[in-house]
Amino acid sequence: MARQRQHVPPPPVPRLYLVAPRVECAPELGHDLDQTLAAADVAAVLLRLPDAGERALIAYATAIVPVVQGRGAALLLDGHPEIVAGAAADGVHLTGVDAFTAARDRLQPQRIAGVGGLRTRHDAMLAAERGADYVMFGEPDPGRAPFDAIVERVAWWAELFEPPCVGYAESLDEVAALAAAGADFVALGAFVFSDSRRACAMMQAAAERLTAPEPVK
């Protein structure tokens, strides 16, 4: 008698990771984030800080932290590990393995330390070996790889490694493919906030695409 195929549970649905726009006015950003976070389940928000001195940066971040945490999301600073404690943020997103290594002891285990700017597979594996809480692939920069290559990198990571992976979507059309590739989180960037009147609708649409991802080709 032929053996019955064992049931394999589907992988968990990825969660959203929101990259906030760089805005000079903290109350304005806090208002926009509060409305946007109400539209969909978001695991974390990455806060990109303006150019300012340390005291001003802490004041800016502390105006945003309760808004984000009040919606059940973690607030991560884009760099600036030196102010994470003073701002009561949940962690920091660092660019490159060297930046992570330099800040790791200051952050972990109390706070999240994620790593992006990983241009090679070796860099990503090195970040994981050194204890990164997550790795990110596909964030925008002058050298962003073609999207097919980003999807392939996410799929490779999801198949072989335990630390969570964030796939960065530059448009709504990229969300489903990153989810299907096995990203644990899908980061949403500037396109969400390109029209403030549609930000909530974009969040809802992205959340829907997480649960009905396109197959990886």
Image (spheres, helix red, strand yellow):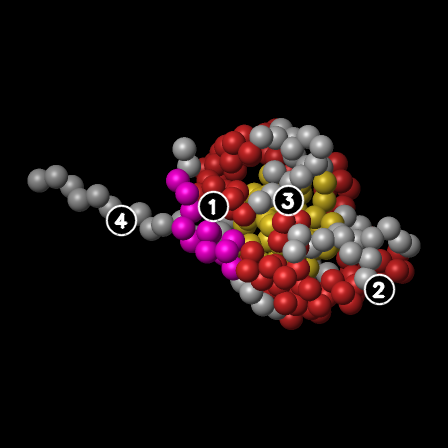
Q: Is residue 88 magenta?
A: no
Mark 1 highlights which residue? 176
Outermost left residue:
1
Mark 1 lies on a secondary structure that is helix
Marks 2 and 3, how far apart at CA: 27 Å
- Label located before the other in sequence (3 or 1): 3
Mark 2 highlights which residue? 59
- Would you place residue 21 above or below residue 214 in this image? below
Kind of residue indicated by mark 3:
Ala
Mark 4 highlights which residue? 7
- Label located before the other in sequence (2 or 1): 2
Q: Whole-percent x and y of residue 23?
A: 78, 56
Q: Which mark is residue 46?
A: none
Q: Which residues are magenta?
A: 204-215
- Label located before the other in sequence (2 or 3): 2
| Circle 3/circle 1 CB separation < 8 Å | no
Q: Main secondary structure of the magenta part?
A: helix
Mark 3 highlights which residue? 132
